[in-house]
Image: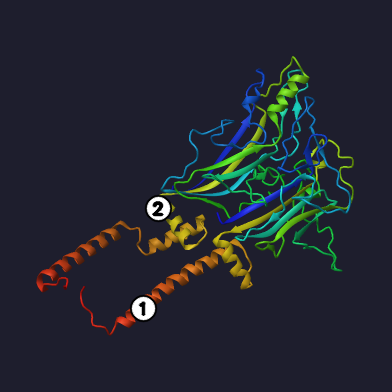
């Protein structure tokens, strides 16, 4: 399992009436006898970027995303909701999406890369147009990374109890996690300016095996050549 | 039937429209449950295990979409639950290793029903999550699909019964709580051996590549029974010849 297709999903819903973050991942949602959820969709102020992993709202991780020495990731897809929000990729302290003047902005808007709730049943947003990031974004060993969610307007003002999925903001990122020997191959591809993809890693692996076989054959031929003039005797 | 496209659907439904629902009959929230042998819904008798002459490639899966439970109870006084969304996640487990890990490198619940929804329909949003590259399960490995519900149904049954005492909630068999589905290719017999060969050569294992390799093998008469007989005859003749040389020429090891 050295090339794995991973995904991370964030929502701004937490359980209870006081918490704003669930550091252990997606919260367990309890329901009252009257069928209402015992939880809140946390307010998100406008133009404030929140890291979907450690931003302090909704389901979070306990530590920021960081790649180990034997890992490399390729981010190739993401999406968000509602339409007034956007996502930006952060690697170290650098934001991927920026305005033409070079200043980072909210990133890729949800309208371009949506991640819709199923409760939206009709309309343009139902199209589910999932554009991929081309070329994909590489995060190298040792780098920290994050995905920042920013809204153009205030979402869930007053952190209300949500009554429908359409009231819950969300973000989603899909990436390839390459680790172990495949990560070494990925780094080789990077050095040679070849795109890192499962196909290219496989191709490189095939070439490695083929070259090894050729080298073995070559050694055998060389040995034969050297022994050609030697007097043969039966052992 | 050496390459077959298999699937398994796990369904968790209610049990009776007349008998009160027992919270213990439904999976606890936040706890991973096997869709094969987890003890809830339809199950099989033994956990999935890949025999030594088999090879499995998991290619697609999905589960019920939605976050909020969107609970509906029949308003006719029967206290029958007619809708409950599980807010579930799917994790693939091979032996004791979980396929999905979060960015802090710890075990996570996996892929939500919103990212990989099931059932599929013409009006559904295309899945955001695609299992590409697929997951290989090798011979002698066990594998599992674990489903985690984050909406707490057992807790809700108790809360409802407290609010509506002495009436109790019933969950009829027509109410489907959750659905999970997995599709995979099962290669067995000689095709499983070909899968191994492809794996060693670093070639992706899929139906097209296995068939391509099989064609090459057949072209080189690799799997023809008469070929084996031919090889056997040749090796026997060679042995006879060697024996004869040893006898006639006194060929033996030198001191």
Q: Position of residue B33 (x, y in %)?
A: 60, 36
Residue in the foreground of this view, choosing between A58 and B38: A58
Circle 2/circle 1 CB separation < 8 Å: no
Q: Secondary structure at mark 1?
A: helix
Compared to residue B205, the image places residue A216 above or below, namely below
Q: Position of residue A113 (x, y in %)?
A: 77, 55
The circle on residue A221 is 1
Compared to residue A208, the image places residue B55 above or below, namely above
Image-based side of A138 in relation to B202, left or right: right
Image-based side of B52 in relation to B167, left or right: left
Q: Mark 1 falls within which chain?
A: A
Total numbered labels = 2
Callout 2: 10 Å neighbours few (<14), some, many (20+)? some
Q: Mark 2 falls within which chain?
A: B
Residue in the foreground of this view, choosing between A75 and B173: A75
Question: Looking at the figure, which quarter contains the N terminus of chain A?
Answer: bottom right
Compared to residue B74, the image places residue B152 above or below, namely below
Q: Please name which of the two marks, 2 or 1, marks the residue nearer to the observer.
A: 1
Question: Looking at the figure, which quarter contains the C terminus of chain A?
Answer: bottom left
Image-based side of A51 in relation to B88, left or right: right
Colour mode?
A: rainbow
Considering every residue shown, the one lying at the far bottom of the view is A229
The circle on residue B190 is 2
């Amino acid at each position: 399992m050295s090339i794995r297709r991973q995904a991370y999903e964030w929502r701004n819903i937490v359980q209870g009436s006081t918490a704003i973050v669930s550091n252990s991942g997606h919260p367990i949602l309890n329901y009252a006898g009257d069928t209402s959820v015992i939880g809140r969709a946390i307010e998100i102020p406008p133009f404030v970027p929140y890291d979907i992993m450690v931003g302090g709202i909704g389901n979070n991780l306990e530590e920021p995303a960081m790649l180990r020495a034997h890992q490399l990731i390729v981010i190739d897809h993401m999406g968000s909701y509602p339409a007034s929000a956007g996502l930006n990729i952060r690697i170290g302290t650098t934001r991927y999406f920026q305005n033409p003047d070079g200043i980072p902005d909210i990133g890729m808007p949800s309208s371009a890369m949506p991640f819709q709730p199923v409760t939206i049943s009709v309309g343009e947003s139902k199209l589910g147009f999932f554009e991929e990031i081309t070329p994909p974004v590489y995060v190298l060993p040792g780098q920290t990374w994050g995905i920042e969610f920013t809204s153009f307007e205030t979402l869930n003002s007053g952190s209300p109890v949500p009554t429908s999925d359409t009231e819950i903001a969300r973000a989603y990122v899909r990436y390839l996690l390459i680790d172990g020997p495949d990560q070494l191959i990925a780094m080789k591809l990077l050095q040679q300016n070849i795109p890192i993809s499962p196909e290219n890693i496989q191709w490189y692996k095939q070439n490695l095996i083929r070259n090894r076989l050729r080298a073995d054959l070559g050694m055998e031929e060389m040995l034969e050549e050297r022994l050609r003039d030697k007097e043969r005797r039966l052992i | 039937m050496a390459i077959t496209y298999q699937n398994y659907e796990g369904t968790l439904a209610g049990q009776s429209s007349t008998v009160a629902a027992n919270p213990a009959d439904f999976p606890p929230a936040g706890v991973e449950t096997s869709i094969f042998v987890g003890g809830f819904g339809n199950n099989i008798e033994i956990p999935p295990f890949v025999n030594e002459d088999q090879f499995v490639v998991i290619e697609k899966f999905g589960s019920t979409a939605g976050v909020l439970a969107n609970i509906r109870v029949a308003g006719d006084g029967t206290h029958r639950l007619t809708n409950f969304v599980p807010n579930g996640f799917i994790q693939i487990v091979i032996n004791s290793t979980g396929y999905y890990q979060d960015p802090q490198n710890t075990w996570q619940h996996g892929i939500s029903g919103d990212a990989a929804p099931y059932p599929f329909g013409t009006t559904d949003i295309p899945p955001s999550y695609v299992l590409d590259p697929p997951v290989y399960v090798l011979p002698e490995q066990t594998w599992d699909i674990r489903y985690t519900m984050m909406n707490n149904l057992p807790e809700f049954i108790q809360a409802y019964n407290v609010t509506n005492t002495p009436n109790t909630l019933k969950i009829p068999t027509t109410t489907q709580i959750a659905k999970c589905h997995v599709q995979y290719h099962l290669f067995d017999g000689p095709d499983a051996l070909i899968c191994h060969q492809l794996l060693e050569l670093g070639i992706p294992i899929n139906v097209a590549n296995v068939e391509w390799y099989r064609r090459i093998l057949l072209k080189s008469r690799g799997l023809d029974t008469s070929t084996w007989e031919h090889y056997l005859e040749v090796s026997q003749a060679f042995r006879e010849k060697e024996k004869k040389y040893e006898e006639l020429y006194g060929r033996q090891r030198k001191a």
